[in-house]
Image (cartoon, rainbow, N blue to C red):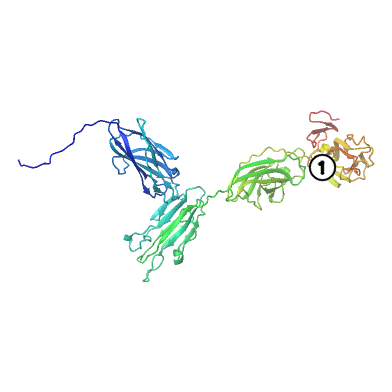
Amino acid sequence: QSLSSYNGWEATLCEFEPKDMVITSSAVTKETATPVCGTKNVQVLHFVLSAENTEQPLQPREFGFNTNGTFAAIDSVKLYYTGNSSKFATTNLLAETDVTANEFTLIPAAMDAFKEGEHHFFVTADISDKAATDDLVDINIDRVVFTDNSSYRDFNNPVSGVKVLNSIASVCDEHTYTISGKWQFTHTAAKAEDWPTVVGGYTMEICDQISTFKPATANAKLQMEFSLFDIFYANDPYGFDTNKAQFVIYNGSNTDADVLFEVNDLASATTLPATVTSTAADGSLTVFFNANPSFAGYNNAGGWKATLSESAIANPMTVISASVNKENVTPSAGEKNVRIMHFILQTENDDEPLQPTTFSFNTGNTFSLINHAKLYYTGNSSKYAITNLVAETEVAADEFTFTTTSAPVLSAGENHFFVVVDVDDNAHNHDMLDINITQVTFSNESSYTDFTNPESTIKILNHITSQLDENTYIISDTWLFTCAYADPDVPEFGFDIWNPGDQISIFVPATEGKKIQMLFSQFEALIYDSNSDSDPVTFVVYDGKGITGKKLFEVTNEQNAAALPPTITSSSKDGAITVLFNPNNDDYIYMQGGKGWIAAVSEIGGTPTGTPSTVCNNEAVKYITPDGQLIINRQGVLYNAAGQRIK
């Protein structure tokens, strides 16, 4: 057995007093990085807890953090534990969570109790797709709470060195990027080993590099602004042809789109391009690059740098609501330009204003009462005006369309339209007339159809008002004949006495062989002061056309000026009746207009030589008074709507 020498051992023995574990210190470090938006698992935070003693070992229950106000740039976070190793690893994932506010908590699903010594933790973040260049990404550790409800909060958090730098380098093959905020787009930088290119320029790789950029925000458009542009585009010095570089920007998401910019000569290869903005529907841009070198030893081109960003978001105009109002009118047969509808298009946003091209309507199958229709536009004014005629059309079927001849451009807010019609000459009393709007189509091929059309109250009321001078009326069906009122809105104020003069109304039957009949439901020609020297009112009904025929009725005194005249029927060969009225007012102080008159004028009897426009039944003639009362004439006797005889 050979002899050898050993050093032996030496140890210190002492008494050991077991104590409960405590955290004696912590250390926090922040990473430095420049991730692009959308990058996953970026290291942001590394913190260390130092534990002493072994009794009652501490076991973390939850970790509290804050983002120092940078949570909008962070989608989610993860917490890793590496034990006593300071080297980052993803083997032991303790917890993860989405980040939607400045403060968040991570609760480990399972974790062993601490041992004495150092304990290393790492926090990583998934960067938001919408994080912009220069956005800071920061995470601070605030507290660690243990299972015994004790906690440690004495952390000193430095400022993060993680800042978003959205940068894209052009590389071979096709790649698509979603752009939010500002991005840098540049060439792939050449390295020293990339001879024959020059360091600082770009790699002269022969391949198609296709970069498609799409805006992250709906309706936004991408724009590209260059700060450097220098492309190698020349023959070699020995006279050999070279395959000149290709650099093209397309207006859209592929290389089939329209060209917005192209390098096609030395000048365009070395001149800073103007800002390029997409006008494509999806707002995208596509860049195609191929260095195409065959002899690149003398390439000293610097490449390009451009900033990609979303342009101001377009807010195209839309129709958000519509309202439809129908007029409460009682037009007569043959009446022109009767206003029957007022509708409003409520729009929002000013970009890409809407321009109507067609307006579609139906008449609720009342088209036979309408000859012609017009559409007027009054902008944001609710006041009817005929200054801006948008379109007009003949109405020959239930459905009809206005095609604009002078299409208005709508403004944001209320846009007012009015529809007027010409009533057919053969429209009958009490016929209901209607128009409904169903669709508006715009120049961008969009349309609006969400209209609620109220029920129509428009009823034909064939009404003639006594007017100055001589006027002839062709009567078919039954017409209402009244005086001109001092205030048309308040008939009870009496007839108009302020325009003295002969008012001659000649009523001629539309059907040959028929006779005009006049049936009064109200009559009060004039009441005047006995001290007045004025001439009494003139009211005479003549047989036939003109004021030379037989008098069928005449006001001769105060009594018959206020009494209901008998039913008057023409006996003349032409079947006509003429009414002469004159208020004869030359004393405005003492004279007062009476309530005036209401009479139903109709054609009766006879043998028509052709098909009449309407057949009048003398057994029961119905008409509506200006105050809305229904009057029924049965063989010359008047009744109200309840069937009660009227005195």
Q: Nearer the viewer, residue 586 or 260?
A: 586
The location of residue 483, given as percent across then percent down, is 84, 41
Residue 64 found in image quarter: top left
Tag 1 secondary structure: strand
Q: Is residue 278 positioned above or below 157 on the image? A: below
Left or right placement of residue 236 versus residue 516 in this view: left
Q: Nearer the viewer, residue 109 or 429?
A: 109
Left or right placement of residue 379 versus residue 573 in this view: left
Quadrant of the image containing the N terminus: top left
Residue 90 found in image quarter: top left
Left or right placement of residue 399 versus residue 290 in this view: right
The location of residue 367, given as percent across then percent down, is 70, 43
- In this view, the residue farthest toward the bottom is 238
- In this view, the residue farthest toward the left is 1
**Residue at 44%, 46% in the rendered image:** 129
Residue 365, visible in the rendered structure = no
Give the residue at mark 1. Answer: 464
Left or right placement of residue 319 versus residue 516 in this view: left
**Residue at 79%, 28% in the rendered image:** 642
